[in-house]
Amino acid sequence: MESALVFTQPHLLKEPKVDFVNAVLLCLLHIPKLVSGVLEGVESESFSTSQSTSSYNGEVALGFAQLIKSIVAGDDSPDCSLLLEACAKHGFTGGDAGDAEVFLLNIIDGLKEDLSLGGTLADEVGDGLIFDNDPERLLSMPSSIATKLFFGLSSSELLCAKCENILSSRLQEEVRVIARPNADLHTQDLMELLAVSERDFIEVGELDPTCTHCNAKHGRYMGHSLYHLPQSLIIGVRRVVFNFETYKMDKVNTLLDCPPVLDLSPFVSVAAPCLSRPLTYNIQGFIAHISDGGMEGAYAAYVKQADGTWLVSMYGRVQSVSQSLAMRKSRMAFILFYDKQ
């Protein structure tokens, strides 16, 4: 399905204020395993058709497959009407701050529900799960093309401040990793912003348990680590914040240094089964918001093709760009796509 990833006319819709739709779809359509997985799932009819009003009923998968096929057929205006109708049916309207990220998550949630691969998330994660909370609700989630590609697991952990022995941990589901740039700085390193790297020190209390490893009480760290890594990592950059003085949403224009190769090993739990697997990701694309500093502006999608060259789609046009230019533009990204090596 490599032909589905070659775009000469990526402007999917002509209506105003839908450039975020084009940006999201262009990035998703450049994930080969997603393209092939959706087509194979629809062809084999392994999608949900339940009559529940809250269910996607296979509509997102069918709409995404329709879009892929129209691109393969060389249509001048690829048809994404079914996909947009399915998302709108479940409350997505667009037009708000962060609408590109909401649209992206709407599609991923729909594909998670629509396309079954058989088995559960536990089959993908593997053995070794020991948590204070009951992880069965998460691990019994049906395996799908979306969970296989995009869904990871993180654990909130209490660690001994001296030996970093894990005192307790709770499993959580994650679709994306969140980075929060500091609005007061001009430039920051993406690696320093990943939310999973945060640790808060907690003073030792009289009722706190003694560490079973070093047999002492040294205070604790509340940590947040990755436990199971997805194939395709989505990083959402929080560039929209509420201004309590103006009571309006402001855009954070801090530049981020985004590496072309991302090593997540510093953020993985010491108890994670994935420690024995590759923990590095290559950048595959990103979405940036182009403006003069305010909320008004346009969305641009930069994507790396199968041959390693880069394309940019902006203002309804597509053109080739160098990798060096793409990486410079990635400093204003608010959604980044990385693929595991």
Image: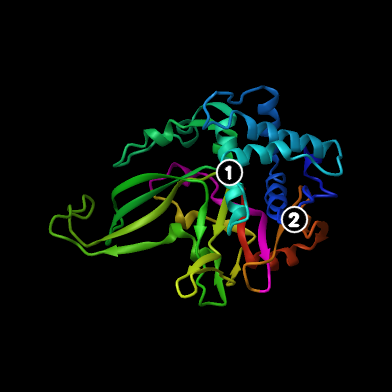
Neighbours of disc 2 within 10 Å: few (<14), some (14-19), many (20+):
few
Say which of marks 1 and 2 sits in front.
2
**Count of numbered circles in the view:** 2
**Which quadrant of the rendered structure holds the N terminus?**
top right
Q: Is residue 165 left or right of residue 216?
A: right
Query: Picture coordinates of residue 202 (x, y %)?
Result: 26, 63
Quadrant in which residue 208 is drawn: bottom left
- Which residue occupies the foreground of this view, 50 or 143? 50
- What residue lies at 82% left-to-right and 56% top-to-bottom? 318
Using the image, determine if residue 91 lies above or below residue 302: above
Q: Residue at x 28, y 58 (%)?
A: 163
Tell me residue 147's x, y (percent).
54, 37
- Residue farthest to the left, as pictured: 206
- Residue drawn at point x = 55 percent, y = 23 percent: 50
Q: Is residue 34 visible?
A: no
Identify the secondary structure beneath mark 1: helix
Magenta stretch, residue numbers: 271-292
Q: Name the residue carrying label 1.
A: 106
Nearest the viewer among 286 and 114 is: 114
- Is 180 located above or below residue 117 in the figure? below
Cα–Cα span, label 1 and label 2: 21 Å
Q: Which mark is residue 16?
A: 2
Q: Which mark is residue 336?
A: none
Q: Earlier in the sequence, mark 1 or mark 2?
A: 2
- Asked whether residue 185 appears in the rendered view, the answer is yes
Residue 203, horizontal then vertical, whole percent: 22, 64
Looking at the rendered structure, the kind of residue marked 1 is Asn
What crowding class fits label 1: few (fewer than 14 Cα within 10 Å), some (14-19), or many (20 or more)?
some
Q: Amino acid at mark 2?
A: Pro
Q: Quadrant of residue 40?
A: top right
Element under disc 2: loop
In the image, 256 versus 58, the foreground residue is 58
